[in-house]
Amino acid sequence: MIRYFTAGESHGPALSAIVEGVPAGVSITLEEINHQLTRRQQGYGRGGRMKIETDQAEVLSGIRFGKTIGSPIALIIKNRDWANWITSMAQFEKNDEKTAKITIPRPGHADLAGLIKYGFDDIRPVIERSSARETAARVAAGALSKVFLKALGIEIGSYISAIGAAAEPSAEVQLDGLLSQGADAISRQADLSTVRMLSKTTEAEAVAAIDEAKKRGDTLGGIIEIFITGVPVGFGSYVQHDRRLDAALASAILSIQAIKGVEIGTAFENARKPGSEVHDELHLSPLEGVIRKTNRAGGLEGSMSSGQTIHLRAAMKPISSLITPLHSFDIETLQPLPSRFERSDTCAVPAAGIVAEAVVAPVIANAILEKLGGDHLDEILQRLDLYRQSIHNTFCA
Ligand code: EPS
């Protein structure tokens, strides 16, 4: 099974990740990892930091001659901004004159709870590790699982359906066309847009909304649509809470900084309708086997993959670092004060879509590995082919 950890402070020397459990024999290039890192850096509304960084991964272990060898894969991404923080983020020597203590927590951020929990008198360490900069390491780690899944015919894509009040009208028609090519097609289309939207009209509205928010010193959140194609029926399980695929996917998405809600299929709309208008009816087709004409369940039934496209939706709150300050207080004087501004983005929803793709990849990979086992890609491919074939033979004429 794939497990991974990240380490690194936002303004420390580097971010790093150790990924264990990627099977041997998966062909991977550094460009594939770096392409995902570049995608994460894009998006209209990003702040000054993205002008400083050009995120690139270095692989320290686990890959030989362009193929995984089953050993832990260690990755690092150096922070260019570290050069400007060597004194205030020094690991050992403290220079009081050059290190300002941060004592005013930002509402909505990890600042206050983190400070109290870890017993600090300075918010800086909380800011450093709770920062969404950490997602660069997760994107690099997730790229390995994405490449593994791609070799199995499983693709993960995303687009942005809302930024603030700018929301896409139903993109269903266009989506069906794209999804029939695999979820990568959605990402390729979305990546052509500066806000990763599919509709040009909504894109213009979103860009205007971001400009407006920036002028006000405000921030915007939005909605991310995530699609996973090519997952056969029966991955995950209903038999135990920790084997439920829907729960594992939701947990992965909620672990992304600033994500506060997850929806599977049209779950919230379904809640207002009777069952007869919700459940995806089963039909048999001689060529395709079991088919459903709708996918309101979002490709997950009984906590297992249904064989349809898995569709998840994530709600991202507006970033909590605002130029126009919100009400706060000083933790030393206990006097009310406006919250201080820490450099940030006006909107990072497009980037969060790339992070969402990355964090669901190991979850899907683990559902495959749990069912099929295997230590080498070829072995897993053989088992998956047999499984797909047996389903075909059972339901197709
Ligand atoms: C980010 C890097 C950060 C922020 C942002 C995301 O860099 P810095 O703190 O140096 O400006 O731009 O992080 C936050 C929004 C946050 O609240 O911490 C990145 O690499 O994505």
Image: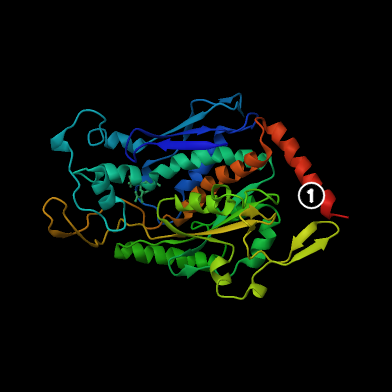
User: Can you say which quadrant of the picture contains the C terminus?
Assistant: bottom right
Query: Could one spot residue 342 in this view of the protein?
Result: no
Residue 164 falls left or right of residue 121? right
Is residue 348 shown above or below 297?
Answer: above
Residue depicted at 27% across the width and 37% down the height: 84
Q: Is residue 178 left or right of residue 322?
A: right
* Residue bearing mark 1: 391
Residue 266 vs residue 133, the one in the foreground: 266
Note whether ligand 1 is within 8 Å of mark 1. Answer: no
Instruction: Please tell me in which quadrant of the rendered image residue 13 appears.
Output: top left
The relative height of residue 78 versus residue 245 in the rendered view (above or below) is: above
The quadrant the N terminus occupies is top right
Query: Which residue shows up at 60% across the image and 42% down it?
Result: 365
User: How far across and down, in percent of the image, does residue 376 sit?
Assistant: 67, 30
Q: Residue at x 80, y 46 (%)?
A: 390
- Callout 1, which amino acid? Ile
Residue found at the far top of this picture: 64
Measuring 76% from the left and 43% from the top, which residue is drawn there? 387
Percent position (x, y) of residue 75? 47, 31
- On screen, residue 206 versus residue 179, left or right, reads left
Question: Callout 1: 10 Å neighbours few (<14), some, many (20+)?
Answer: some
Q: How is the image coloured?
A: rainbow
Task: Report the number of discs.
Answer: 1
Question: For numbered disc 1, what is the local secondary structure?
Answer: helix
In this rendering, the answer to whether 338 lies above or below 102 is: below
**Spot occupied by residue 362 in the image (x, y as percentages of width and height):** 56, 42
Q: Closest to the observer: 122 or 175?
A: 122
